[in-house]
Image (cartoon, rainbow, N blue to C red):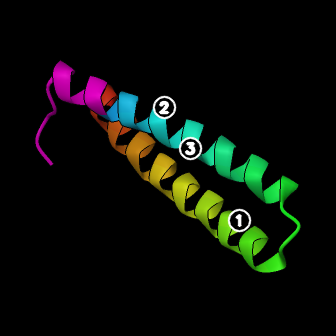
Amino acid sequence: MNQLTTRELLYLEDICKLFESTMKNCNFASNSAVDPEFKSFMQSMVTEHNQWITATASIVNKNNLQ
């Protein structure tokens, strides 16, 4: 991947913050859930958003080091 511009890195950082917020909400819903199927679904959403955060952060970190 080519060097990202400052603007592109800022967009990725904003997306990362959005994913973190969504993950926290999903985690709260999962912890509050009574229905086991819904709880499982929300836990999978937490895992999925965590993977997106990790992937996005690695792109930002890799480009900041270059």
Is 6 contained in the magenta span? yes
The residue lying at 68 percent from left, 64 percent from top is: 42
Q: Nearer the viewer, mark 2 or mark 3?
A: 3
29 or 8: nearer the viewer: 29
Is 24 contained in the magenta span? no
Specify the farthest residue to the front. Answer: 35
The residue lying at 67 percent from left, 42 percent from top is: 24
Task: Please tell me in which quadrant of the rendered image residue 66 appears.
Answer: top left
Q: In x, y percent, where is residue 30?
A: 78, 59
Task: Please tell me in which quadrant of the rendered image residue 6 appears.
Answer: top left
Disc 1 and disc 3: Cα gap in Å?
Answer: 12 Å
Disc 1 and disc 2: Cα gap in Å?
Answer: 19 Å
Does residue 66 appear in the picture of this structure? no
Q: Earlier in the sequence, mark 2 or mark 3?
A: 2
Does residue 36 appear in the picture of this structure? yes
Disc 2 and disc 3: Cα gap in Å?
Answer: 9 Å
In the displayed structure, 9 sits above or below 56; it is above
Give, as a three-letter code, the residue at label 2: Lys
Circle 3: is it few (<14), some (14-19), or many (20+) Cα within 10 Å?
Answer: some
Give, as a three-letter code, the residue at label 3: Thr
Q: Secondary structure at mark 3?
A: helix
Q: Which residue is mark 1?
A: 43
Q: In x, y percent, where is residue 64?
A: 32, 26
Give, as a three-letter code, the residue at label 1: Gln
The residue lying at 83 percent from left, 61 percent from top is: 33
